[in-house]
Amino acid sequence: MKFLKAATVSVAAIFAVVAPTAASAADHATGALNIIPSGQLESGQDVSPYPNGAFDFQAKMYDALTPLYRNVTDADLAPDKFFKAEALPSTLENQPGAFVTTETPKPGVTIKRTKYAVPYVYGTTDDDVTWGSGWVTAADRGLLLKQARYVGLTAAVGVPGVSAINLLSTLSNFVPSKQTNDFVAKSQTSAILAQGARGKRLLHDIDVYLEGINAWYAKNEPATAKFTRVDIYSANAIKGQFLGEGGGKEIANSDMYDALTQKLGKKAGPKVWSDLRSYDDPDSEVTYADKSAPWQKQSKSIAGNVVLKNGSFVSASPTAKASTRAQSELAATAAQREHQASNVLLVSGDRTATGHPLFVGGPQISYFFPGLTMEIGLKSPTRDVIGATSAPFPGYMLIGRGADFAWTLTSAGSDIVDTYAETLCGGSKTKYLYKGKCRKMGTFKAGTILIKPGSKDEKKLDATFRTTVHGPVQGYAKSRKTGKLVALSQRRSSYGRDATDLLYNQSLTDGSVKSFADYKKAASLTPQTFNSFYADDKHIGFYTSGLLPLRKKNSTGDLPVDGRGKYEWTGFLSTKGHAQGQDPKNGILVNWNNKPQKNYPASDERWSEGPIQRQQMLLAELNRNQKNTLATVTGAMNAAATNDVRSVVLWPVLKQILAKGTAPSPREQQMVDLLQQWHDGGGTRLDLNKDGLIDAPGAAILDASFTQMAKSALCGRLTTKICTILNDEVQAIWEAPPGGEYGGWHQYMFKDFKTLLGQKVKRKYSTSYCGKGNVKTCANAMWAALKAGGDELAKTQGADPANWHSSAVKEQIHFTPVPMLTMAFTNRPSGIQQVLSFDGHN
């Protein structure tokens, strides 16, 4: 650890080169609310001093908003009803009765807590606040710190097939090797130092933050091993893997490509693959339509790629030797990120009653207790901010607000991960060809994975893996062209520099951001890929971040890349080339993890950026009002959060297809009438009478019929085998609640149906799928699927479709790993949701 000690001395010496900016003295917010359903405290902490500090108090507020649907009023936005007040530290500092408890853990640091147990850290210096943040994080997220300090290292070093967030949520653990600790310490610290003065300041802040963490443990749990920089890097790597990366699905994609080519031929197969892949579908709704953001056009040639023989892949992940159950608990999947249904609604002043922008949004990071985020207020000479932070952030705000602007994030999932097919040589599985030389693979002995340690299900897995110049070896497969075995390694642009992400949050916290232009500069500092949103009293805007690779011609990031050295990345996209925009002509920026801008390609793990997007439901709700208020924007979010996108967007077109055929019996016609009633009522999956059943019979009808509808729509053309690959490896038929409803074959059905009906689409598919191009045949298949669904429902729920209901209990939200409150299904932000506006006159 000599390297770390030297770096610490260096940082202390040069810290003064970054000049502080004075914190704002006035608060310009006219409305400022938030909610974090996981609450502030974790199990085992004393909640008795705090009237609203019970573990489930905020979850109950969050859950209570759901039944209001779109009917949210101004009165509903009173503090302490469905949201808490999000007050700046400067406004509360001397306000009588604002705080319930006060502690001074060291001179210069005062920590005051509200009735919700939310800590406000006041410091004489910036270092005092950073130290106090460490103290508070240890107190309020001790369990998270202890777990994240180790399991996140699996993400930092890239253990194949392992999801750090899954390790965390199942209370599994990881014992890192010296090789892992040394690699993470050296690579991350070097990457930070390479960022100049701000990087050196970041290391200084990490060290001061660690002093606060370790001081709390020395006083309260002295047996705990001291926390180090590596522990902070580890926690940040969890965030990066869970929410801040995209791509890496080339092996599954190649299975699909090869299956289609073998079945449909070398001409038709790739065209159908392109249809389903939807790399850059012009029919997809975007967040900002005023300009395009052509990152990279899809390559017309795949000469630089290696197509794998479908079904030949054999994993080299440590999980490959584990049980099926263990694999499901550990494996990293694209579907995890697709479930993270973060949403943001920003409305510019010309579309609001006040003439100033409105802001409702936040990240959906699932429902963990203890929470992955916590609230904190920070006040020092340069800081006056409030919002959500987490373990990796050394006195920095993850999402929040200052006196005159607010910001939030949604996962962008941009393609920053590629898989390389390594040509084996020397008659060995551990030697590969690169730039004309036969090289030996490296061996990374990362440590030991402990699945549910201390329980009867405890398992130990050796996390040793091979590496090439491109990264960790994921496994082996056969090349379709040569028939020979290739090794498959994975390259991630953020690898070894995850922690430079913190420079973004440093800029947001220390008063550096004065405008949207400043905000874009800050967002451009992170290698992780997010849609970053901004609002002040005049402007709204967004920037899609990430270290985005530039790929060579004749090569696509959708399939494994030839790893012999000819098709390496040529650099990274410039800041100017990123998706970004300010003050859209339509006055609205909405995002629900969808495509940010025209011509911005979907990463190879996202096959769902087609003509149906959840954001369309947000737009429809906002467009109900000529002039929006905070209440109507909140209502728009709340309504869309329980709506079924199939009912809202797909159903009108599906109904037109059904009209081209004939109902098999009056029962099926009644089912159609009930589906229409459900659509007309908003398409919600609410259970308002709380009998455990979704109120609308239409939900049960579509749920029971949809799988067969989807298969009937596509599989006649694709075959059952290819449909199985599509569903199991690439794009599930339907991501049922409480998932995010991000993916599903309804994307393909919608465009194919419209084409069959002769309706305009911007880009037609290469072929017709449903009914093989015959609209009447397609209609009859849809009626048959509807009848089959009705037959199944009648067996268990009686003959009358009006009495059919889907279970609302199956869709309820449960907190993990420690159970807390069970909530009704909703698709709302969970890391923090803010409701804000500024007028600039206070």
Image: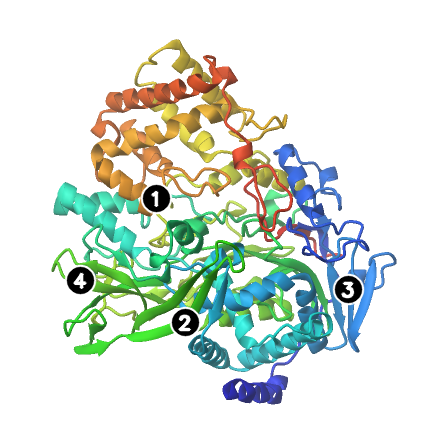
Q: Which residue is mark 4?
A: 485
User: Mark 1 vs mark 2: which is more N-terminal?
Assistant: 2
Q: Which residue is mark 2?
A: 446
Q: Secondary structure at mark 4?
A: strand
- Give the image location of residue 485, x and y in percent: 17, 62
Seen in the picture, residue 678 relative to 274 is either above or below; the reply is: above
Q: CA distance from mark 3 to mark 1?
A: 49 Å
Labels 3, 2: front one: 2
Amino acid under disc 4: Leu
Viewer-nearest of labels 1 and 2?
2
> With 136 as the anchor, is 720 left or right in this view?
left
Q: Amino acid at mark 2?
A: Ala
Rendered position, 280 above or below 766: below
* Residue on which disc 1 sits: 731
Res 631 → quadrant: top right
Residue labelled with disc 3: 90
Crowding at label 4, few (<14), some or many (≥20) Cα neighbours within 10 Å?
many
- N-term mark: 2 or 4: 2
- Residue flagged by tag 3: what amino acid is it? Ser
Quadrant including the C terminus: bottom right
Front: mark 3 or 1 = 1
* C-alpha separation, residue under disc 1 versus residue under disc 2: 32 Å
Place of residue 639 in the rendered image (x, y in percent of width and height, measured from the top left): 58, 35
Say which element carries label 1. Answer: loop
Give the image location of residue 371, x and y in percent.
61, 55
Q: CA distance from mark 2 to mark 4?
A: 26 Å
